Amino acid sequence: AQSVTQLDSHVSVSEGTPVLLRCNYSSSYSPSLFWYVQHPNKGLQLLLKYTSAATLVKGINGFEAEFKKSETSFHLTKPSAHMSDAAEYFCVVSANFNKFYFGSGTKLNVKP
Amino acid sequence: GAVVSQHPSRVICKSGTSVKIECRSLDFQATTMFWYRQFPKQSLMLMATSNEGSKATYEQGVEKDKFLINHASLTLSTLTVTSAHPEDSSFYICSHQAGVQETQYFGPGTRLLVL
């Protein structure tokens, strides 16, 4: 079975400071992992994905995530937050690229 | 990235009526299409998966006679909520997948309010 736990429902950072959004997963198989971002009234946009290649994955807009099998984690980071990063972020696990299991989401607030 | 559109973006209907939501992939052909539902302050939950040329597969707890899914073509899928009730009010999101083990691309969602 697959599941995802996003440890923080809300994260607030100041503009220019680092961002850390935490995600832990559970999977019976070698998982594929994704981070999606959802801006208000917009569709889900793929930030990055891990598919058993390099464990450090670089995505769009300066985001990256590191797959740590020993910790069953896939945390999303960004060195310097921008106001436009304010949105809701979803961590997703999939065992076969078909069924996606979404985390509960983390709302990122960026303060000026 | 690939673009998926949904129509309408927002719909209000009376209890007992049916509502159709369309989902189109604009620049690729989708062999597999998915429909999700997102209740307020909750995450997306998969409702059903539709593969080209076969009937939709529904997740446990999702009534197939209430949520009719049609994989009309490689670029169009529709979800019809039949005899809608207030508890069906939700945010419905589709996604299209170009092939096996390909990324899913999501539509912007349709907010349904049943009065």
Image (tube, rainbow, N blue to C red):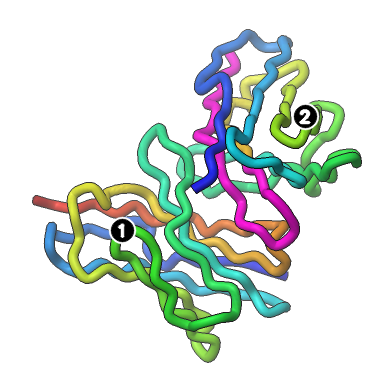
To which chain does the residue with label 2 belong? Answer: B
Mark carried by residue B67? 2
Query: In the image shown, does A52 or A24 lie closer to the viewer?
Result: A52
- Circle 1 residues within 10 Å: few <14, some 14–19, many ≥20: few
Q: Is residue B97 magenta?
A: yes
The reply to the same-chain question for discs 1 and 2 is no
Residue A100 in view, yes or no: yes
**Residue at left offset 41%, top offset 55%:** A89
**Is the Cβ of the residue at disc 1 closer than 8 Å to that at disc 2?**
no
Q: Secondary structure at mark 2?
A: strand
Query: In the image shown, does B47 or A94 lie closer to the viewer?
Result: A94
**Residue at left offset 63%, top offset 8%:** B14
**Residue at left offset 53%, top offset 32%:** B109
> For the residues marked 1 and 2, what is the alpha-carbon distance in whole angstroms?
37 Å
- Position of B18 compared to B64: left or right? left
Q: Which residues are magenta?
A: B95-115
Image quadrant where residue A40 sits: top left
Amino acid carrying mark 1 in the image: Asn
Of all residues, the one furthest to the left in this rendering is A112
Amino acid carrying mark 2 in the image: Phe
Question: Which residue, given by chain and number where applicable, does mark 1 sit on?
Answer: A61
Image coordinates for residue B77, horizontal then vertical, percent: 72, 31
